[in-house]
Amino acid sequence: MRIPPYYRLPSWQRLLAGMAIGGFISWFIFLYIFGVWQEEYSTQIKKQEEEIEKLNNDKKIWQEEFKELNKRNKEQLTVQEIKVKIINSEKYDLDTLSVFEIEEEVKDDISVMNAKDINTVFKSRDLIRRVIENKTFKVNDKRYKLEVSEIVIFTTLSIQLKISLAD
């Protein structure tokens, strides 16, 4: 079996030549369009990289300013609340009203520390301890004294006390 000699016919030769020329032209068009797209994408990526770099620098500046502002605010913190808690009132069978009255009296004694900056309160913690421990409280014809167990100083001044019978 033999292949017919269509390659000798001019119509077939024109068809094959047209297909080859069309293939070359379409390949060059594809390369041009692909090149234009790549150029646009690389330009867009470059712009985005510059914008990201700019935003990162802005973020660093804001973070540094925010840290500095927080540092200054910490230096200016004040005591806003005073909490006093007696931790061993069950030992002496004190009712809750008596415990509450003692806690409120201690709060009144150290209320001058309210609205003071934390640094000042920290420096005067020994004074606070002496004010509390040198005072005696009379409850149900018995005299009690307090001992400071723990002092926590921040925006809330928290004091834990132990109560005992006075000599």
Image (tube, rainbow, N blue to C red):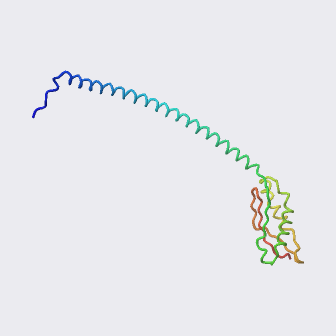
Left-right relation of 47 to 27? right
Q: Which of 148 and 11 is in front in this view?
A: 11
Q: Which of 90 and 147 is in front in this view?
A: 90
Taking the spot 74% from the left edge, 61% from the top edge, the residue there is: 152
Q: Residue furthest top?
A: 10
Q: Where is residue 8 shown, x and y percent of the image?
A: 15, 23
Taking the spot 86% from the left edge, 62% from the top edge, the residue there is: 108
- Numbered label tally: 0
Q: Where is residue 65 shown, x and y percent of the image?
A: 67, 41
The quadrant the C terminus occupies is bottom right
Quadrant location of residue 82?
A: bottom right
Taking the spot 73% from the left edge, 46% from the top edge, the residue there is: 72
Q: Which residue lies furthest to the right in this view?
A: 141
Q: Where is residue 147 shown, x and y percent of the image?
A: 80, 69
Taking the spot 76% from the left edge, 51% from the top edge, the residue there is: 77
Q: Where is residue 131 shown, x and y percent of the image?
A: 85, 64
Quadrant location of residue 67?
A: top right
Q: Look at the picture and state if 136 lies above or below 24.
A: below
The quadrant the N terminus occupies is top left
Q: Residue furthest left?
A: 1
